[in-house]
Amino acid sequence: MDRAKVEALFAHTAGIRCLVVGDLMLDEYLWGKTDRISPEAPVQVVDVIREELRLGGAGNVVHNLAALGVQVSVCSVVGDDQNGRELLGQFCLNHIDTRAVFLDPDRRTSRKTKVVAAHQQIVRIDRESREALPAAVEQQLRLWIAGHVSEYSVIVLSDYNKGVLTPAVIASTVTAAAEAGIPVLVDPKGTDFTRYGGATLLTPNRKEAEAASGIAITDSASLAHAADVIMTATGLQHLLITRSEEGMSLFSTGGEIVHIPTVAREVFDVSGAGDTVLAALAVGIASGFSMAEAARLANVAAGIAVGKLGTSIVTPQEIIDAVSLAHKDSHAKIKSLDVLAPLIAAEKNRGKRIVFTNGCFDLLHAGHVKYLQKARNLGDLLVLGLNSDASVRRLKGAKRPLIDQDERAHLLAALDCIDYVTVFDEDTPLELITALKPYILVKGGDYSLDGVVGREIVESYGGRVELVTFVDGKSTTNIIERILELYSA
């Protein structure tokens, strides 16, 4: 995964609108300890220490999407009962749009109680409805979806086989979305995947793919065969089969196959991981990622989810941190302004003094390094604004820079004294200084205070300008002249 691209994605997820249609339920967790056997029966006695309610089923997909910064609406049917009211209350706490959650007084809201002791689920109690929707309620859903589908960037169908996603609801949703040019992603259930015909993508696990295709998946050949059977029967554009410790496999029309290895990490609980995959896929696709890129993003998110106990959300920062582990180099320090600004704001809230300097830094030399080390020692964190290639050409002429901006950024980011590098295209760093509001603005000793761009801004909120002298005789111009002198003959 490209870390910078993932950071840029999560900087703009607030503009994504997602509609989740599916089966809602409450997940109740009873956390406790057990150290004795009941005298009444050969069963463990659990002393309950803590109780917790979480959004389950399609609600967990909704919760994951909201945690990733997306605007989410949910469309479903619940009972007009205490569990239904508690479920709607959970959505309200998470600022989820529930105007399309319809109440059916004859339906029981599903609730699953999971008893956990010693980090293991030891029993689950289900109280749920599995009946198909009454015709009148089904029609309500279909009409609402048809009237509002164009408001969304992506549609997610989360099927838990509890009756909400009837064939008619699925068909009308897929049709309306297709007419509006909106992708539909489905987490399927059952053995008949033809009812999801026309969807953009299905995300079955291996067991579900075997049941739907009638093919035992034992190797890459049988995996490809099963995928071909499913895609042919359903008219899918894409199929993502999740395969536990073997990772994921993405199949697309035209025969393209992408195998994505699992992200190695300790597994505590796989429940809800499929919901996390679906949410991350939706965010990636709605952000313009290719299907393969979105699948890789989902793979990283799933690796985080299985390291948690119970149905859990995954945050943008967790995904960024996980992606960064694969980039233990200068990549991790190079940020665009829209990504960098909130990071710097958070550092300032923690009391850090931010130092800022800028320049072209073409042909990095010892003078540059000593200057930057001095700048870093003035505060807690050094941000370097690097002139882009176009900016350097305007400032220094058509023959510069000698080193392009990407190479210059990586060389600078490799220095321990630099915490972040951001490239700017303007002639001056005024926009960066205005956005980042550093406490200390550093420039070379060849400047006068009056000539420092951004001085007035920094001093307006109590910051200051520091002038740091360069090492005598160390400059890019001198290096160029020396090379010409030695090699011009």
Image (cartoon, rainbow, N blue to C red):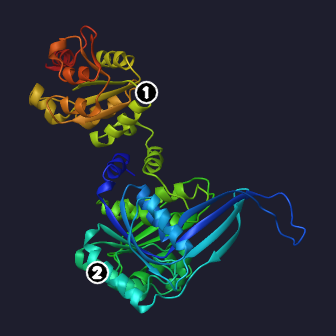
Which three-letter amino acid code belongs to the residue tagged 1? Gly
User: Is residue 198 at all visible to an observer of this figure?
Assistant: no
In the image: residue 414, left or right of residue 467: right
Residue 390 falls in image quadrant: top left
Residue 469 falls in image quadrant: top left
Residue 198 falls in image quadrant: bottom left
Q: Residue furthest top?
A: 472
Secondary-structure class at tag 2: helix
Q: 467 or 326: which is nearer to us? A: 467
Q: Pick whichever of labels 2 and 1 is earlier in the sequence.
A: 2
What label does residue 204 carry, if any? none
For residue 78, above or below residue 453: below
Q: CA distance from mark 2 to mark 1?
A: 51 Å
Label 1, residues with CA under 10 Å away: few <14, some 14-19, many ≥20 = few
Q: Position of residue 362 (x, y in %)?
A: 23, 26
Q: Position of residue 298 (x, y in %)?
A: 44, 60
Secondary-structure class at tag 1: loop
For residue 55, above or below residue 404: below
Label 2, residues with CA under 10 Å away: few <14, some 14-19, many ≥20 = some
Which three-letter amino acid code belongs to the residue tagged 2? Ala
Q: Which residue lies under the disc numbered 2?
A: 146
Q: 389 or 454: which is nearer to us? A: 454
Exactly how many numbered labels are in the figure?
2
Q: Residue furthest right?
A: 39
What label does residue 351 carry, if any? 1
